[in-house]
Image (cartoon, rainbow, N blue to C red):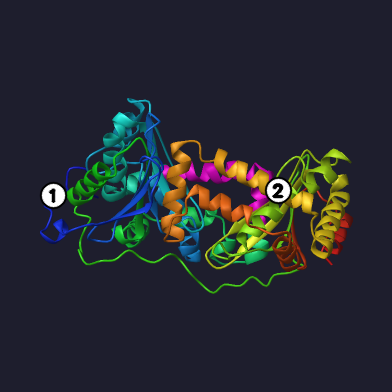
Amino acid sequence: MTSRSSKVTARPSSEARAVARTQTLIKGQNGIGTVRKTTLPGGLRIVTETLPSVRSATFGIWAHVGSRDETPALNGATHYLEHLLFKGTHKRSALDISAALDAVGGEMNAFTAKEYTCYYARVLDTDLPLAIDVVCDMLTGSLILEEDVDVERGAILEEIAMTEDDPGDCVHDLFAHTMFGDNALGRPVLGTVDTVNALSADRIRRFYKKHYDPTHLVVACAGNIDHAKVVRQVRAAFEKAGAFRNADAQPIAPRDGSRRIRTSGKVELLGRKTEQAHVVLGMPGLARTDDRRWAMGVLNTALGGGMSSRLFQEVREKRGLAYSVYSYTSGFADCGLFGVYAGCRPSQVHDVLQICRDELDHVAGNGLTDDEIARAVGQLQGSTVLGLEDTGALMNRIGKSELCWGEQMSVDDMLDRIAAVTPDEVRSVARDILGQRPSLSVIGPLKDKQAARLHDAVA
């Protein structure tokens, strides 16, 4: 068993001190909103956005690994590893990690998705060096002790149970399975009780060493920060950990693939003794790199993105059939999903589905009005800007952009791209996406006759 005092720190090699490459990707006004990128020898990318008007900074490290990188036997390993990196390093115990950020009023957390994982800390700007040291230490020096794996297994099983107790959340996992089937994108990010119980410390360590190489990582930092200082501090932390093993290594390219979803008319029902039936009706959407994604964003906003949207007005305002009803899109490297969610009384599920289906069919055939499109464009522009009002959101934007697209887009360019969406583009993407035969996922206390009728809803 590895002990926390067993590591001998590697001294930086002469190769590791090679020259870094720095670029200004977005030039802000008077230094505000300037985005810079430095690529270190060894393949680690560091992107920052400067916002001198705030007193905080958010520091994050993005890993190019998610649940779609898991084999069936490893389902849940990425999320398990996310938990374990908080359990201790050669320098710090789990208590040391949490206490360090608590002592300065900082916030630290992480999240796992299907195509990436992110670890981050938000602190006062004066405490940024501490946040950098702690998060870098977690990413480069995790021990993954067997005893920690055993303890954290219980916490993860409780998290799975908590998700299963929330059918409004669980139905989205069911819909992913309905659309993708039994493959990596169709399996839950958390894993299952069986796969989590079967994961060993040794298998998780191997997964960690394979996917947490500097070439797979992007460091992102936003707030009242200095790019050069962040680069020096990150570089020192990684060199001290001996993480740069090959000075000639290059960052891996953004994820690509050739998956195409051909699922249509599939229905999956999960019987639960719940007060509501939870429904997702949807179809294949767009990959995140598809140029039509801007028009798709406008379409999604008009259909189910707010209180004035068609679905909200028809299902809730006019008929009072549901409290929560909305539409959403999920874009992956090579495919995507479009879905409509509603939670309603089991006796009303067929009425709700019929209204949603009628609206989707109507928009597919006739499009949206110019007024609806103009309102959706304005709403999408406003929500985009309001969603970037804190350093955490800025860190997320630049980190994800570098990892997933390999480029940065300024907020002004994003707003211009949304404004440039034409009614014809929205109607075209509506025909392409909404014109497909939908699939359906439902969780609730459905009787046999109801279940039989649900299959007719997607015919």
At 83% from the left and 65% from the top, the residue drawn is: 365
Q: How many numbered circles does the render carry?
A: 2
Query: 416 above or below 89?
Result: below
Identified by mark 2, the residue type is Ala
Q: Which residues are magenta?
A: 152-175
At 29% from the left and 48% from the top, the residue drawn is: 142
> Which image quarter is the C terminus in?
bottom right
Give me the disc on residue 365: none
Local secondary structure at mark 2 = helix
> Would you name the residue on which mark 1 appears?
8
Local secondary structure at mark 1 = loop
At 56% from the left and 38% from the top, the residue drawn is: 386
> Would you name the residue on which mark 2 appears?
376
Query: Which residue occupies the foreground of this view, 134 or 271?
Result: 134
| Residue 443 visible (yes or no) | no
Identified by mark 1, the residue type is Val
Chief SS of the magenta region: helix
| Residue 264 visible (yes or no) | yes
Which quarter of the picture shows residue 248? bottom left
Whole-percent x, y for residue 400 in the image = 45, 53
For marks 1 and 2, the one nearer the N-term is: 1
Whole-percent x, y for residue 246 in the image = 20, 64
**Dot 1: few (<14), some (14–19), or many (≥20) neighbours within 10 Å?**
few
At 47% from the left and 50% from the top, the residue drawn is: 410
